[in-house]
Image: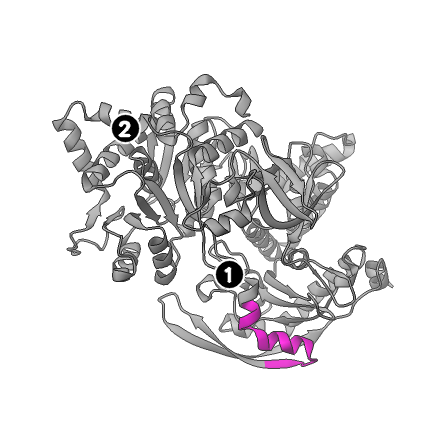
């Protein structure tokens, strides 16, 4: 809590000041690790201080000045995190950019942000920036971490990280007072100064630059640490996009304020192995990561022998019955506790070990609503998984779930120092120390989002339950009604379907229409494993998605969801009447998802209008041609005849009973 912060903490109101303190207080503790060529490299807090100091002075020699913007582009690498703090010591503002952005997206952010410097990971990012040319006229210097492939590049404005650092060290060797000058330089910066600029994912339009102050981030991070009792002994795995507020808080703000260790995996392909080796104590992942973990578990169990499969099914039944109760400290009979302990030895423990979550102290999910069944699965294993509700504009934290008060259908109570209210139109609003300063060069958007007295419009519809917990219904703009007046909450329906390992993505339609229909993306890993077990040959996603047996499998899942919805009074009228399995995977490169993997509904509605029309005009199939963007940037097209199926619906309250009869 802010009120409990020591005088020393209150004085350390910027990350450079906190870094200086950590170098003294936690000097020999490991601050960062990076896996390189299969070996973990480590840096202590005192070594990190030395690395940042040298690079900062080198940046200053290149001309980086207060209020300049420096783009940070690449995967999670210690040097990229250090570069952000190095820039902050000079009063400059880091602007993390999604590394998988295509050149056009990146050029917009860099141009709009008036970026002068860029710190990038490797040749791929260097090539992107150099290709922009006149699109980003403000860009003067590009610095890279990994030199592979860049030996013959001769651009004068291109620099290796080591070269800039060596310049800094050389200048300190020549001037014994330079280090003190460097410290004095950032001692004058305050918590109210801009610490970072993070661009929104652009779900509804062009990304906006969210300006966050040191106070926003430092206070929010300290409150988060206090809430979950996080200290310098924690281990986290930094693998989420650096341009996302979640990673910025968990891998930088909370790491610096608590003093814990940040571990950077070798690559996206080795994350599972690296997590197993590190066994993080504090872990954050969006629902998609937990969905993928569950999918892999289910696929592996389908491939397991009969005895292992029976043992898994039996003890997961025990876990569903009493696992969460034991985790919450509730009363459980001796027999059930004994069975659960046997299950821990035979099933739950090995599963947690395989996922690299054996030492987990607290885990979080946010960004999208997680399916209640998925949430329950992990908690029933004894994993302290919680939900939080947050935004970039809030420096993450709006609500948190206190230990012992974990409910699958809510996102918790107001986080420390956060005020929460529901507007007359049902929109969730909040006010806190984490509320952003404003949108860069967009006063109109700032005024429409943040009221003069500091309340922020979230854009989400929600209710505060009798127990004080917030329940998010959906995006306020997405919640609608069918023509018969029934409530239509697309995300709620989509998450129910995404619980099934065979389903990766769903888009529901129904607002101001006579019925609910859905697009479905199959999960290629899960369905591909099923195809292999059943000797079903396929050459592409498209071919597998159109397979009649796959369609029958998906139809059974939709039927299950309809029976679920029939038992829920508020949602019984929103049962799915028709569905199709989309002929291609929704892809951020095609503009269908944001870089944080959120569905861009309006874009999909425009792009696939012929398919949506076919869902509502009674067609049983529709031929479509869709343009796609390949990984190398080339354009192409996919053609397919997509099948459309009708679904049975159930009387409210009769779903499973009717099916049984």
| Secondary structure, magenta segment, majority class | helix
- Magenta stretch in the rendered image: 604-622
Instruction: Kindly state the secondary structure of the residue where label 2 is placed.
Output: helix
Q: In the image, residue 443 lies at what x, y percent?
A: 46, 49
Q: In the image, residue 313 lies at what x, y percent?
A: 69, 49
State left or right for residue 589 relative to residue 535: left
Q: Residue at x 58, y 52 (%)?
A: 291
Residue located farthest toward the left when viewing the structure as drawn: 174
Between marks 2 and 1 in the image, the one whose residue lies nearer the viewer: 2
391 up-or-down from 329: above or below: below
Residue position marked by numbered label 2 in the rendering: 185
In this view of the protein, can residue 60 be seen by the observer? yes
Q: In the image, residue 452 lies at what x, y percent?
A: 55, 41
Distance between the alpha carbons at the discs numbered 2 and 1: 42 Å
Residue 593 is tagged as: 1
Closer to the camera in the image, 499 or 183: 183
267 up-or-down from 433: above or below: below
Q: Residue at x 26, y 48 (%)?
A: 144
Q: Magenta span has 619?
A: yes
The quarter of the displayed image where residue 173 is located: top left
Q: Quadrant of the C terminus?
A: bottom right
Closer to the camera in the image, 266 or 579: 579
Q: Residue at x 77, y 62 (%)?
A: 486
The quarter of the displayed image where residue 340 is located: top right
Q: Magenta span has 461?
A: no
């Amino acid at each position: 809590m802010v009120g409990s912060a020591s005088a020393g903490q209150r004085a350390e109101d910027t990350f450079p000041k906190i870094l200086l303190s950590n170098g003294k207080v936690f000097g020999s503790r490991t601050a960062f690790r990076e896996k390189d060529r299969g070996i973990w490299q480590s840096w202590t807090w005192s070594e990190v201080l030395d690395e940042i100091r040298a690079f900062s002075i080198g940046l200053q020699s290149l001309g980086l000045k207060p209020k300049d913007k420096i783009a940070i582009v690449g995967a999670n690498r210690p040097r990229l995190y250090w570069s952000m703090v190095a820039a902050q010591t000079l009063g400059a503002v880091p602007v993390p950019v999604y590394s998988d952005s295509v050149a056009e997206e990146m050029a917009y952010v860099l141009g709009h942000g008036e970026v002068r410097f860029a710190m990038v990971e490797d040749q791929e990012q260097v090539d992107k920036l150099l290709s922009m040319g006149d699109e980003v006229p403000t860009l003067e210097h590009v610095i890279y971490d990994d030199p592979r492939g860049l030996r013959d590049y001769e651009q004068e404005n291109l620099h290796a990280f080591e070269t800039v650092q060596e310049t800094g060290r050389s200048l300190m060797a020549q001037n014994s007072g330079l280090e003190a000058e460097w410290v004095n330089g950032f001692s004058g910066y305050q918590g109210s100064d801009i610490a970072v600029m993070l661009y929104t994912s652009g779900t509804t339009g062009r990304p906006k630059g969210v300006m966050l102050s040191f106070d926003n981030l430092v206070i929010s991070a300290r409150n988060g640490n206090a809430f979950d009792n996080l200290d310098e002994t924690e281990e986290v795995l930094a693998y989420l996009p650096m341009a996302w507020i979640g990673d910025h808080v968990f891998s930088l703000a909370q790491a610096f304020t608590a003093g814990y260790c940040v571990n950077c995996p070798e690559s996206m392909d080795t994350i599972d192995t690296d997590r197993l080796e590190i066994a993080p104590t504090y872990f954050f992942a969006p629902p998609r990561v937990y969905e993928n973990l569950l999918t892999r578990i289910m696929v592996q169990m389908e491939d397991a022998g009969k005895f292992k499969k029976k043992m898994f099914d039996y003890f997961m039944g025990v876990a569903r019955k009493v696992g969460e109760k034991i985790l919450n400290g509730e009363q459980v009979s001796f027999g059930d506790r004994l069975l659960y302990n046997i299950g821990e030895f035979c099933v739950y423990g090995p599963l947690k070990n395989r996922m690299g979550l054996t030492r987990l102290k607290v885990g979080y999910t946010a960004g999208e609503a997680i399916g209640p069944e998925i949430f329950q699965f992990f908690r029933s294993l004894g994993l302290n998984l919680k939900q939080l509700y947050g935004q970039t504009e809030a420096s993450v934290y709006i609500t948190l779930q206190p230990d012992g008060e974990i409910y699958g259908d809510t996102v918790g109570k107001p986080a420390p120092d956060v005020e929460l209210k529901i507007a007359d139109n049902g929109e969730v609003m909040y006010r806190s120390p984490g509320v952003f300063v404003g949108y860069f060069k967009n006063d109109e958007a700032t005024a429409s989002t943040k009221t003069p007295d500091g309340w922020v419009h979230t854009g989400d519809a929600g209710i505060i339950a009798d127990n004080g917990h917030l329940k998010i219904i959906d995006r306020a703009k997405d919640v609608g009604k069918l023509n018969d007046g029934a409530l239509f909450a697309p995300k709620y329906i989509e998450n129910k379907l995404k619980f099934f390992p065979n389903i990766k993505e769903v888009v529901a339609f129904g607002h101001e229409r006579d019925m609910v229909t859905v697009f479905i993306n199959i999960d290629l890993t899960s369905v591909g494993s099923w195809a292999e077990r059943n000797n079903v040959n396929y050459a592409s996603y498209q071919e597998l998605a159109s397979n009649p047996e796959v369609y029958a499998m998906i139809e059974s899942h939709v039927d299950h969801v309809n029976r679920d919805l029939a038992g829920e009074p508020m949602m019984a009228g929103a049962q799915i009447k028709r569905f199709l399995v989309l002929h291609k995977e929704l892809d951020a490169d095609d503009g269908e998802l944001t870089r944080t993997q959120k569905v861009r509904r309006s874009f999909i509605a425009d792009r696939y209008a012929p398919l949506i029309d076919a869902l509502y005009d009674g067609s049983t199939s529709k031929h479509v041609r869709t343009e796609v963007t390949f990984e190398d940037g080339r354009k192409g097209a996919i053609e397919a005849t997509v099948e459309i199926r009708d679904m049975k619906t159930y009387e409210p309250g009769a779903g499973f009973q009717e099916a049984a009869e």
